[in-house]
Amino acid sequence: MREQAHENLMELLRRFMDEPTARTVHEDIQAGERLLDAEPAPTPEARLIATIKTQMARAALRRHRIVRLVHGSLAAAAAVIVLALVGLLGPGSPSRPPMSYAAIIPAAIWDSPDITADDLDLAYFSSEIGQIEAQMQALDAGESEGASGALDEFENELMEIQTDFWKG
C-alpha cells in the first residue's frame, strides 16, 4: 500500500477502535500484505483464462436476452393497459354534451351579412375603435393641439374599451 493509503486506513481504524487496538490491527494488516508480497500467486494458464472469458460472455448474453425479453413484455403490457383505458373511458365524457359555438350568437345575428351592425355591443365597440383610430391619425398628422396629453388619454380609453370587450 502507498503511504497515503496507510494513513487513511489508520484514520478509519481510529474511528472504530481505541488507539492501541487500531495500531495492532494496522500492524496485522501490514504483516499480511508483506506475506502476500513475498509469495506471489501463480499465473493461470491461457486456456483457463479463455474458458473463464467465454463463460462470462455467455452469462452476459443470457442476461441481455432476459432484460430484452422483460422490456418487451413491459412495453406490450403498457400498450394493452393504455388500449383498455381508452376503450373503457372512451374519447369523451358522455355526461357533458359537446359545445356548439354557433349557439353563443343568436341565429338572426349569425345569418346576418353584417354581424357588427346587428349586435349592439359589437356596434358600440366598433364605433369607439373607429373614433379612436381617427383621433390618433389626426394626432399623428399634427392636426390637433396638445398632442401628448390627448394621445395618452386616447390610449387609456382604447385599453378600457378592450378590457370591457373581453369582460363581456
Image: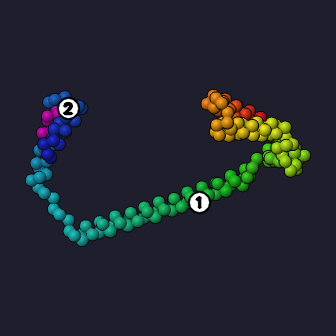
Q: Position of residue 90 (x, y in %)?
A: 74, 52
Note whether 84 is above or below 160 in the view shown: below
Name which residue lies at 34% across and 64% down.
Answer: 56
Residue underneath mark 1 = 76
- Whether residue 120 is visible here, answered yes or no, is yes
| Left or right: 43, with 131 as reference point | left
**Does dot 2 land on a helix, a strand or a loop?**
helix
Asked if marks 1 and 2 touch (Cβ < 8 Å), the reply is: no
Q: Nearer the viewer, residue 162 or 68?
A: 162
Camera-side mark, 1 or 2: 1
Q: Nearer the viewer, residue 75 or 57?
A: 75
Screen quadrant of the C terminus: top right
Q: Position of residue 75 (x, y in %)?
A: 56, 58
Q: Which residues are magenta?
A: 21-27
Q: Which residue type does callout 1 highlight? A: Ala
- Whether residue 162 is visible here, answered yes or no, is no
Residue underneath mark 2 = 14
